[in-house]
Image: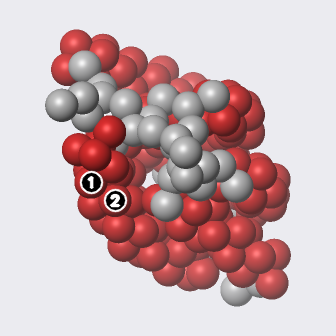
Amino acid sequence: MSWIELCGALLSAWAVWLTARRRPLCWPIGLLSVVVYVGIFVEAKLYSDALLQVAFAGLIVYGWVRWVKNLDASGRVRVAPLPRRHAVRHLLVGVLGAVALGFAMHRWTDAALPWLDATLTSFSLVAQWWQDRRHTAAWWLWIIVDVIYVGEYIYKHLLITSVLYAAFIVLAAIGLRAWQRAGVADAPA
């Protein structure tokens, strides 16, 4: 356990907590956490996770801009529905991304868990895309991905990070419930 991993975990947890509460401050805090986690994952030879953090940085900027344009009177982001056809299309992109990244990591790197890491990375990007676009479904996908991440990080002896991802499951459940309520409240009569 390192103090750097602990700082990254605390920043990440804070960002997810703010996201669950639909607060735009989640974005700059999240950006700080991904910077810390790039180094952690490179050290652990979880290269897909490191690349994921870089992608998250770009998606954080995108999400931040989208959210600021969609705030309600209380300063919280409005929840938006996810059409079924978009969900299916995005999940198929997740599968294709997992196969392509898994192959690349298996073939050209010494990645510790190339296929699992690539799959989690790909579906984390889908979940982040949904989060950026204000879809409640993002929380369901985060719960699934985070459960698997807990096992991966225990296996890689990233104990603080495994505890963080266990906390993410709880925060995702809280976020899901809060966003479902907000979606009902924001729905046209």
| Amino acid bearing label 1 | Arg
Task: Give the label on residue 181, or none.
Answer: 1
Q: Residue at x 45, y 23 (%)?
A: 97
Answer above or below: position of 130 versus 75: above
Answer above or below: position of 188 versus 26: above
Answer above or below: position of 86 versus 77: above
Name the colour scheme. secondary structure
Quadrant hosting residue 151: bottom left
Residue beneath disc 2: 178
- Number of other residues with Cα within 10 Å of mark 2, as a class: few under 14, some 14 to 19, many 20 or more: some
| Amino acid bearing label 2 | Ala
Q: Residue at x 57, y 39 (%)?
A: 71
Task: Give the label on residue 69, or none.
Answer: none
Q: 69 or 26, which is in the foreground?
A: 69
Left or right of 27 on screen, residue 79: left
- The answer to whether residue 59 of the structure is visible from this angle is no
Left or right of 102 on screen, residue 43: right
Q: Residue at x 53, y 74 (%)?
A: 164
Q: Residue at x 65, y 55 (%)?
A: 26
Determine whether label 1 and label 2 are within 8 Å by CB.
yes
Task: Residue 120 in the image: state x and y as whole percent.
Answer: 44, 45
**Dividing the image into 4 quarters, which one contains the N terminus?**
bottom right
How many dots with numbers?
2
Task: Residue 124 in the image: state x and y as whole percent.
Answer: 47, 42
Quadrant hosting residue 5: bottom right
Quadrant hosting residue 43: bottom right
- The answer to whether residue 159 of the structure is visible from this angle is yes
